[in-house]
Amino acid sequence: MARIAFIGLGNMGGGMAANLAKAGHAVRAFDLADAALARAEEAGCTRAASAAEAAGDADCVVTMLPAGRAVLSVYRDAVFGSVPASALLIDCSTIDVASARTVAAEAAEKGLAMVDAPVSGGIAAASGGTLTFMVGGEGDAFARAEPILSAMGKAVIHAGAAGAGQAAKICNNIILGATMVATCEGFALAEKLGLDPQTFYDIASKATSQSWSMTSYCPLPGVGPTSPADNGYKGGFAAALMLKDLKLAIAAAGDAGASVPMGAAAGALYQAFVNGDRDNLDFSAIIQMLDGKQQAN
């Protein structure tokens, strides 16, 4: 079993760190929030006083942070100067491709192996150990990272060189965001045309409009498998995080000269939705705006 430093214990990171401890790894955890540290201790992790202390003698460092600037700061200011030369670095944050490539290059300059490994699956999958990891980095680093990531997920896929994991993540989520909007529009229209939501689900889930957004994450309560819609749109994947990922994808498309009109439209709709106090609602809650029951600000 490995000595693992886990930095960033938010909604996703907390469950991930707990699963590493459950798998028998010695997890030394750090977060700026004391409550998050307390939960990690209850899950079998050891509390660290700082990111540098967590990384001190680690075989592996796993980070789950909110933005590219935070990732660059933590690695430059705390991790690079603390870890042994043999340590493996795994960043599971969702950040821009350029920042992922920059921090990987800086790690390589210091002789450290690193992969970017953003996740798909949301809070429930993070807690349940059923995440999907999209991994960018050299083959040897991926081979070292795979058993660590497997303790937290159901699928670990090598996407390519440094930054490829982030590229796969934002491409995945631009599809997800646009698909959820279209799914919500279809259910809202079906209701206005007098169709029973469950009847429409029974039809559409077996027809050509079937998608993950419909059959695994239906945006209507009481329809399909249990989803955040059945819990007042709490938990799951926050609308603010979907907006963040859509912005990353739209920016990357601009840099690459790619056309993403559907993604841009979804981004504009999620921006309208999160205005005000709706950023922490699940991203499927956008149906409340699209069906006319909640107006955009």
Image (cartoon, grey):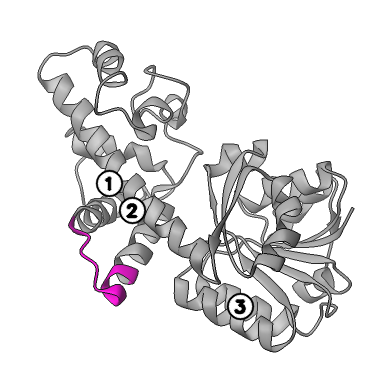
On screen, residue 235 versus residue 139, left or right, reads left
Report the span colored magenta. 252-261
Of residues 243 and 131, the one drawn nearer to the viewer in this rendering:
131
In the image, which disc is placed on residue 218? none
Q: Would you name the residue on which mark 3 appears?
A: 104
Q: Earlier in the sequence, mark 2 or mark 3?
A: 3
Tell me if mark 3 has few (under 14), some (14-19) or many (20+) residues whose alpha carbon lies within 10 angstroms of its own: many
Residue drawn at (84%, 52%), measured in percent from left and top? 45
Q: Position of residue 156 (x, y in %)?
A: 62, 49
Q: Is residue 259 magenta?
A: yes
Q: Secondary structure at mark 2?
A: helix
Q: Is residue 289 above or below residue 276?
A: above
Q: Would you name the residue on which mark 1 appears?
A: 178
Q: Amino acid at mark 3?
A: Ala
* Distance between the alpha carbons at the discs numbered 2 and 1: 6 Å
Q: Secondary structure at mark 1?
A: helix
Residue drawn at (31%, 21%), measured in percent from left and top? 205
Of residues 94 and 193, the one drawn nearer to the viewer in this rendering:
94
Q: Are marks 2 and 3 in contact (CB under 8 Å)?
A: no
Q: Would you name the residue on which mark 2 appears?
A: 174
* Distance between the alpha carbons at the discs numbered 2 and 3: 24 Å
Q: Earlier in the sequence, mark 1 or mark 3?
A: 3
Q: Are marks 2 and 1 in contact (CB under 8 Å)?
A: yes
For the question of whether residue 210 can be seen, the reply is: yes
